[in-house]
Amino acid sequence: MNNPNHPREIIVSGIHLELTNGLKAHVREKMERLFRHEERIVRIKVELECDRKHDHEHKFIVKGHIVIYGPDINAAVEADECYKAIDLLVDKLDHGLRKRHGLHKNKRNHPHAVEFDGVDLPKAV
């Protein structure tokens, strides 16, 4: 399904959070699922943010942006744990890709009829 020569670009950035190699590897491993479902993905950007408004609790916000041929897909998730937020984000982005694919498939299988009643069409020469 996917072309092995096609580069899979995943950009991971951290806001108020130190990105470890394990965290980056976890994000890349989970995002591979999206590449298996859709072959026209150009790149995926993931932002991991730690919200430290509360002294005793940390809330993690993970934002995902899929650059794809056509309209891009964006999603954001909040959770108490970073790894849990990444898993929820992948589920949300996967749902968006499936929904988008279903809309395109529905359009392709059920084209709308066009009526030319009362319209002057140019004559072929």
Image: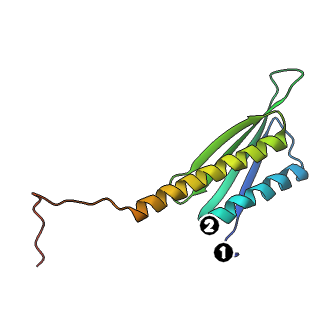
Residue in view at x 12 percent, y 68 percent: 122
Residue in view at x 68 percent, y 58 percent: 34
Q: Which structural element holds mark 2?
A: loop
Using the image, tell me which numbered label, if any, was put on residue 83.
Answer: none
- Quadrant housing the C terminus: bottom left
Residue in view at x 82 percent, y 33 percent: 80
Task: Say if 57 sits above or below 113 in the image.
Answer: above
Question: How would you rate the neighbour count of disc 1 (Cα within 10 Å): few for under 14, some for 14-19, many for 20 or more?
Answer: few
- Quadrant housing the N terminus: bottom right
Q: CA distance from mark 1 to mark 2?
A: 8 Å
Q: Quadrant of residue 67?
A: bottom right
Q: Amino acid at mark 1?
A: Asn
**In front: 108, or 31?**
108
Q: Is residue 77 left or right of residue 68?
A: right
**In the rendering, at what x and y percent does residue 96 appear?**
59, 50
Task: Say if 20 sits above or below 76 in the image.
Answer: below
Q: How many marks?
A: 2
Q: Is residue 31 left or right of residue 54?
A: left
Q: Which structural element holds mark 1?
A: loop
Using the image, tell me which numbered label, if any, was put on residue 39.
Answer: 2
Q: Amino acid at mark 2?
A: Glu
Q: Is residue 112 left or right of residue 63?
A: left
Residue in view at x 88 percent, y 20 percent: 55
Disc 1, disc 2: CB below 8 Å? Answer: yes
Residue linked to disc 1: 3
Instruction: Give the mark, 1 or 2, whose residue is nearer the N terminus.
Output: 1
**In the rendering, at what x and y percent does residue 123 appear?**
10, 72
